[in-house]
Image (cartoon, rainbow, N blue to C red):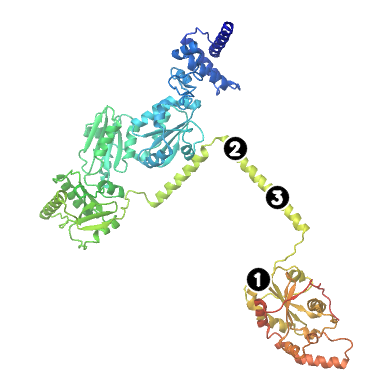
Amino acid sequence: MIVCQILLSCLLLSISEAETESLYDVLGVKRTASQNEIKQAYKKLAKDWHPDKNDDPNAADKFTKINEAYETLGRPDKRREYDEFGYTSATGRQPSHPHGGFHENYNPFSAFEQFFASGSGFQFHFGGNFGGIDKYSITLRQYETDILPNSHRKPCVIYVYNDFCFNCMRIENYVEKYLQELKAAGLCAATVHTGRDALLVSHLRIINVPMIMAVSAGRITYFKGTVNTQTLRDFTRTLFSPTIFSKVKDGTFQGFLNGFINNRVSAIFFGLKQDPGTRFLAPAFYYQDNIAFAYVCTTDPETRMLREKYNINNNRETLLLFNEETDAPVASISMQRLPRTTIDEVLESNKYLMLPRLSSQRYFDELCPEENKVKKRKLCVVLVTKKKKEHDQYRESFRKFSQKSKLAGHERIKFSYIYEDTQKDFVLALMKERIQENDTAPLKVAILWRVEEKKLTYEWLETGWDLQREKEKICEEKLENRLTVLLTTDSILPYRTNLPELYNEHAASLLVRIGNKLLFWADRIMLYFTRHDDMTWIAVFLSVIFVIGMGYFMHKLASIEEEKIHLSQPQRKHPRPPSRTFDEKAIHMYELRSSTYKELVKEADTGLTIVVLVDKESKDKLLQEFSKIVLPYSRYSALTFGFVQLEYHISWFRHLLQDGTHSLMNLSHINIHNCVGTVLALNGFRKCYYVYIAKRARKWIIDTRNVTQALGLMDSDFNSDEEQENEDAKASNLLFIDDLLVGLQVWLDKVFDGSVKKIKITEWPDMTDAMQS
């Protein structure tokens, strides 16, 4: 028993030693190696056996073993456990997770990442931990609800990356510093990991990594070129329009300051650089709807007078803001380096003129926000003017009052003016409750309280706004007193209205907007085509050529096969020829003979071929009368009209009668004269026909009850000549050409409504052009 225990202990010890030696052997170090030696060995092996660098099929397994070995031996506490108990980082006991199993956050590449995090110039990030740039990560929802809508005022740069991406690792330091610069400049910075948000990757049409892209004014721009600090800064500058800043000199700055008539504050940045940097471009882009921006280089000799006038320090960055009074800035700030937060504070506090104009819906929303509580209501005092110089003095007078009044600067009151001739719908919505006054009256002043987004209550200042000295004083007192009452009491405004949206006076013209939209789509199309490499387009081109070639080849085969089938199976049906002329004033009358028999009867398409039987004497007159009767029916494409010359085709008619009536009599001596005027409606497709017999002949048939004799079917060689002559005379007296077709129209109507009995045959008899003797 003791011997067995000794043997078992030796076996376990040998297994343990083998396992220990195998981990140290993986790194190629001795069991007594120092931590530094283990680290150096790991560095060399990790580079040599990385799957992206080594083509050996066992590289991935070897690389995993190397990381597992370093995960255990690279940490003194784990190495000590391994030496004592034989634990490994992958399979050993994990005291911090008593429930067993794999640690859900375990990363087999973490040791590799920690090692290359210092001193190597790039980092490996297996398992998705990209450190500093992960905090900028966004989702599809954030992109659609925040980044894209706000890109019209705040451009956003997006960096796309992935794990096991060596180019991503190589540029990560540049990108991280770049994103920090963007944040410091007040711009949006975001990152997208292609393995975490497939929907956003698909939405942005990302096909490779790393990728740097930007969204500005709803438009996506892609970075191209080598990644370094300067190229990334240059890329940022391309996101802003070059016209966002005006360059002013000594001779042009006053004209720039007078631009307040466009309802925008004027701002001038002074800096040492020739062009404004991102810290100036970003706030200019954000406030461009409210403020017009200009830039002055402090080293430019052509701006010396301007800098002296405003006492600008050439070695510092300076910002000056001007409103309607251009003699002195309304605000100024000068620092060695202007931070974005300070710039925003100054611009936000002074983004409106002293008397701004309601020139768009956005201005109205900002100056006159909605407030449904009476005690917190915000009032807008609006001077209604017209866009002409004569009203400049009214606007100046009203502006001075808004600054000197005791209510000036009150947070619940905003003074503004509006162009009546530009904002007609808005002003008319207010005027409907007030009788229009004549042109000599003072300008109107409206006090507005916006209760809801589209609803407001208002009243008109009783005195209006007059420029006469005494009346102007009264107008000021009346307005000030009324505003004080509205602010301090629950007094209501008498009128209510639903407001239309204000016209945007700053919007580009229709043609410019259409042009911009076309340019936008052209740019999107160009970007789509240029994003793919040459090999992709070559593959697409070859695929298109292959598809077209195969399509043409298959079409050719199908055509050949169809032609073979067509030749092997002759055409059984012929389309019907037209029944009337092109001008629709006459009908086509076809002669039924051997050459037209197939087309009109035997192989004709569905429909009827209606023919009249004629001889030489009656042909012209009968065809003329027949054409008049059937002309109204010629509009139907399923009907064709013609005639049969009995002298040539009496035998065909005889066979047709024999087959249809199943007559056992001898019809070889049928009387041609008795058949003239007979009309046949032939249905070649269904092998049946209808027969019309002349009206007076029908009466004689009814009286004599002898159909065959009426058609001359009883004539034979046994009749004497005298008897034949008597019968011919009787027949000639019976049928008159003028009366032959009297009942044809009624008969045709009965044929179409199905009340005429059809005569069926087994086969159409052959027709030959042979003169009967």
* Residue that mark 3 sits on: 556
Circle nearer the N terminus (3, 2): 2
Where is residue 639 drawn, in percent x and y? 68, 73
Foreground: disc 1 or disc 2? 1
Task: Decide which of 578, 33 is in the foreground and name it.
Answer: 33
Query: What residue is drawn where x is 20% and y is 38%?
Result: 328
* Residue that mark 1 sits on: 637
Task: Decide which of 605, 470 is in the foreground and name it.
Answer: 605
> 693 left or right of 526?
right
Where is residue 38 drawn, in percent x and y? 49, 12
What kind of element bears circle 1? Answer: loop
Query: What residue is drawn where x is 53% and y is 8%?
Result: 30
Quarter holding the N terminus?
top right
Circle 2: residue type:
Ile
Label 1 to label 3: alpha-carbon separation: 34 Å
Foreground: disc 1 or disc 3? 1
What kind of element bears circle 3? Answer: helix
Residue 414 can be seen in this image: no
Circle nearer the N terminus (1, 3): 3
Judge whether 602 appears above or below 691 on screen.
Answer: above
Circle 3: residue type:
Lys
Circle 1: residue type:
Ser
**Residue 287 figure quarter:** top left
Label 1 to label 2: alpha-carbon separation: 54 Å
